Image (spheres, helix red, strand yellow):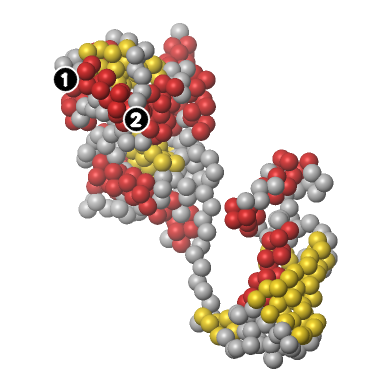
């Protein structure tokens, strides 16, 4: 056990000294800026700092001052100390990577008030004086010995969303006409309105007009300029939306208030649905604060227990989609319950089969590896400790899960335990579909932007193929 133990006023002698050493990190600067509110660009703006007099990011002066306080409050005199006054002269800037040694020395005692004056100096790794001054404290008169407090770890999160580049690029391309099916709830109207205002969709609302207007009134949104196709119930709304998608009158669909099962059933009709030569599959794009880039998770919704051929289609859809998001050669991790191929676990056999398919050109455009467990995919350190090497470890763009069940559980764990933001699309049909239930306006808007990028990518690929064939 580690303890903090003070030195009382009577124990302190003139000339007594104590010290500590700390190295300034970028994280220290960020935490201090958050705590103090001091966002002077000299501390947090690299572009500005490089043009400033020191030509680099420098630490807050009072970060060093706080280190003086640390010595006085925890070491000499230690617990029970009361700060009375402090003077500091700043002699040199402190940059990231500088190592400071803080030293306090007792120079004067006032027995009547139990006060002690300390000379304070802070030197860097080159022994240059960075700060100097003096501090006056009321020293404790009672002996105190306490267990050191165990403090929580601080995790810094990105101050921006990984979805931002997708929104920017989609806005350049322009909106899609979106068939919105049975939007009879206020949240759906809010999401559609936000995507429309953001420049991503031109909504065509399909459902019972009376219910749509009631939902809009509840949401306090004016939909008088929106095209509304009045149909009696949700099934007819789905049929009408699919017909418009087949004829090319809308470029995407939004599930809205119709059930997932009802819409999928209508979409999968051989002659009247939205089937193509590709398998339908769902991709979920995750912005996980603890992962350095966007993750594509597939398939957590549509294909309940896919066999090898369906998994091939799921994987190819995800690779093509990742390319639409700007990933030139997506790294694909095929997840399973163990890292070795075992006939007793079908997911491991399927993973090996997918990797062989990629080698033979049956899956194109990505770097595949599997079977891999989730911990090995995310943590290079864990994988290394197990002797596993792979180009996708610690750098995966796509996670292919064994089944809907595992994918859905994983997505919800990341959302509710790791605070990920998620936006998803159904791929493989004639048009992309926002299939998930709308409960987050921002995520729905992002999904509309993803649909634009997906459609635009497939158009460009079709043009490219046409030129190659001609």
Considering every residue shown, the one lying at the far front of the view is 112
User: Extreme bottom residue here?
Assistant: 10
Q: Quadrant of residue 202?
A: top left
Q: Residue drawn at (29%, 47%), measured in percent from left and top?
A: 409
Q: Quadrant of residue 99?
A: bottom right
Q: Secondary structure at mark 1?
A: loop
From the viewer's side, name the closer residue of 463 and 200.
200
In this view, the residue in front, 89 or 383, is 89
User: Which of marks 1 and 2 precedes in the sequence?
Assistant: 1
- Residue at horizontal 53 percent and vertical 45 percent from the top: 158
Tag 2's secondary structure? Answer: strand
Residue 241 location (% of width, % of height): 25, 16
Q: Quadrant of the C terminus?
A: top left
The x, y position of residue 156, in whole percent, is: 54, 52
Residue visible at 31% across and 31% down in the picture: 187
User: In this image, 441 relative to 211: left or right?
Assistant: right
Q: Is residue 26 visible?
A: no
**In front of the other: 123 or 231:** 231
- Residue 246 position, x and y percent, is 27, 13
Above or below residue 332? Residue 379 is below
Residue bearing the label numbered 2: 425
Q: Position of residue 232 (x, y in %)?
A: 16, 16
Instruction: Look at the image and tell me whether residue 336 can be seen.
Output: yes
Number of numbered discs overlaid on the protein picture: 2
Instruction: State how far apart marks 2 and 1 are (Cα).
Output: 24 Å
Q: Mark 2: give few (<14), some (14-19) or many (20+) Cα within 10 Å.
A: many
Q: Which residue is mark 1?
A: 233
């Amino acid at each position: 056990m580690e303890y903090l133990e003070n030195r009382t006023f009577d124990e302190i002698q003139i000339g007594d000294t104590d010290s500590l050493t700390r190295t300034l990190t970028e994280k220290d600067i960020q935490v201090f800026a958050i705590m103090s509110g001091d966002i002077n660009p000299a501390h947090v703006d690299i572009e500005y700092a490089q043009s400033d007099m020191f030509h680099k990011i420098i630490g807050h002066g009072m970060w060093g001052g706080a280190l003086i306080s640390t010595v006085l409050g925890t070491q000499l005199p230690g617990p029970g100390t009361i700060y009375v006054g402090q003077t500091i002269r700043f002699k040199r800037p402190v940059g990231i990577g500088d190592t400071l040694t803080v030293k306090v020395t007792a120079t004067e005692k006032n027995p009547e008030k139990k006060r002690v004056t300390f000379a304070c100096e802070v030197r860097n790794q080159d022994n240059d004086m960075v700060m100097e001054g003096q501090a006056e404290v009321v020293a404790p008169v009672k002996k105190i010995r306490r267990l050191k407090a165990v403090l929580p770890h601080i995790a810094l999160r990105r101050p921006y969303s990984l979805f931002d580049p997708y929104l920017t690029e989609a806005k350049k391309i322009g909106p899609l006409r979106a068939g919105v099916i049975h939007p009879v709830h206020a949240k759906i109207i809010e999401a559609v309105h936000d995507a429309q205002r953001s420049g991503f969709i031109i909504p065509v609302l399909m459902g019972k007009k009376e219910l749509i207007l009631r939902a809009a009134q509840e949401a306090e949104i004016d939909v008088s300029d929106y095209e509304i196709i009045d149909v009696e119930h949700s099934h007819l709304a789905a049929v009408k939306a699919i017909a418009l998608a087949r004829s090319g009158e809308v470029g995407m669909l939004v599930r809205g208030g119709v059930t997932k099962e009802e819409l999928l059933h209508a979409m999968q009709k051989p002659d009247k649905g939205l089937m193509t030569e590709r398998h339908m599959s769902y991709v979920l794009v995750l912005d996980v604060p603890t992962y350095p880039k966007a993750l594509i998770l597939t398939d957590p919704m549509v294909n309940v227990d896919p066999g090898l051929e369906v998994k091939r289609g799921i994987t190819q859809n995800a690779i093509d989609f990742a390319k639409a998001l700007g990933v030139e050669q997506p790294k694909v991790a095929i997840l399973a319950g163990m890292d070795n191929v075992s006939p007793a676990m079908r997911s491991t056999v399927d993973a090996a089969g997918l990797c062989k398919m990629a080698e033979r050109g049956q899956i194109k455009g990505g770097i595949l590896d599997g079977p891999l467990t989730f911990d090995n995919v995310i943590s290079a350190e864990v994988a290394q400790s197990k002797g596993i090497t792979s180009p996708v470890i610690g750098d995966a763009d796509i996670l292919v899960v064994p089944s809907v069940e595992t994918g859905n559980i994983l997505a919800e764990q990341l959302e509710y335990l790791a605070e990920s933001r998620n936006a998803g699309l159904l791929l493989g049909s004639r048009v992309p579909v926002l299939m998930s239930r709308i409960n987050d306006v921002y995520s729905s808007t992002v999904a509309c932007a993803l649909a634009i990028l997906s459609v635009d990518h497939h158009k460009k690929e079709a043009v490219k193929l046409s030129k190659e064939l001609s």
